[in-house]
Structure formats: C-alpha cells, structure tokens
Amino acid sequence: MYVDDYLGSARSVDEGMKEASLIRKTLADADLHFQDWISDSEEFVRVIQGEKK
C-alpha cells in the first residue's frame, strides 16, 4: 500500500489531533510514516510539529 496524500477535516484541534494520532499509528503499523502536515489551523500545525520533536 502506498499513500501519497491524505485529506481529512476536524471540528477542533483536539479532534484533529486524535485523528492524526490514529492515522500515524495505523500507517506506522504498516511501516509507512507521515512526513508533513498542512492545515489552515495555525494552532494544529504548531501542536503537530511540536509532537515530532
């Protein structure tokens, strides 16, 4: 399986983080790893980038 892009939406940053966590785990289980996140929510981007460190 190869995933190039993923498009999703969430009603809040918390909901988005839960979805992002599930996506990361599911892909990691298949030895696939998300590299970059893009969002129109600056808060989501700050939080998700902070988790990568």
Image: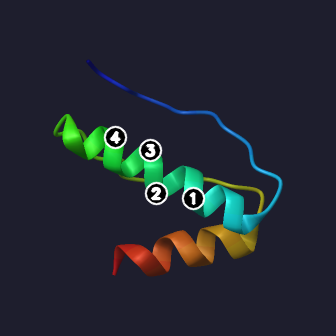
Residue type at numbered disc 3: Ile
Amino acid at dot 4: Thr
**Which label number is shown at residue 23?**
3
Depth order, front residue of 4/30:
30
**Relative side of 1 to 42, left or right:** left
Q: Residue furthest right?
A: 11
**Local SS, label 4:** helix
Residue 12 x, y percent position in the rendering: 79, 62
| Residue that carries the numbered disc 4 in the rendered image | 26
Check whether the beta carbons of the residues at disc 2 and disc 1 lie within 8 A of each other: yes
The image quarter containing residue 27 is top left
Residue highlighted by disc 1: 18
Q: Neighbour class for label 1 at 10 Å: few (<14), some, many (≥20)?
A: few
Q: Are marks 4 and 3 in contact (CB under 8 Å)?
A: yes
Q: Who's the residue at 69% across and 58% down the image?
A: 15
Work out which quarter of the rendered image holds the N terminus and state it: top left
3D distance between C-alphas at marks 2 and 1 = 5 Å
Q: Amino acid at mark 2?
A: Ser
Q: CA distance from mark 2 to mark 3?
A: 5 Å
Q: CA distance from mark 4 to mark 3?
A: 5 Å
Q: Is residue 50 above or below residue 12?
A: below
Q: CA distance from mark 1 to mark 4?
A: 12 Å
Q: Of 22 and 6, which appears nearest the observer?
A: 22
- Tag 2 or tag 4, which sits nearer the N-term? 2
Disc number for residue 21: 2
Residue at coordinates 48% horizontally, 73% vertically from top-left? 49
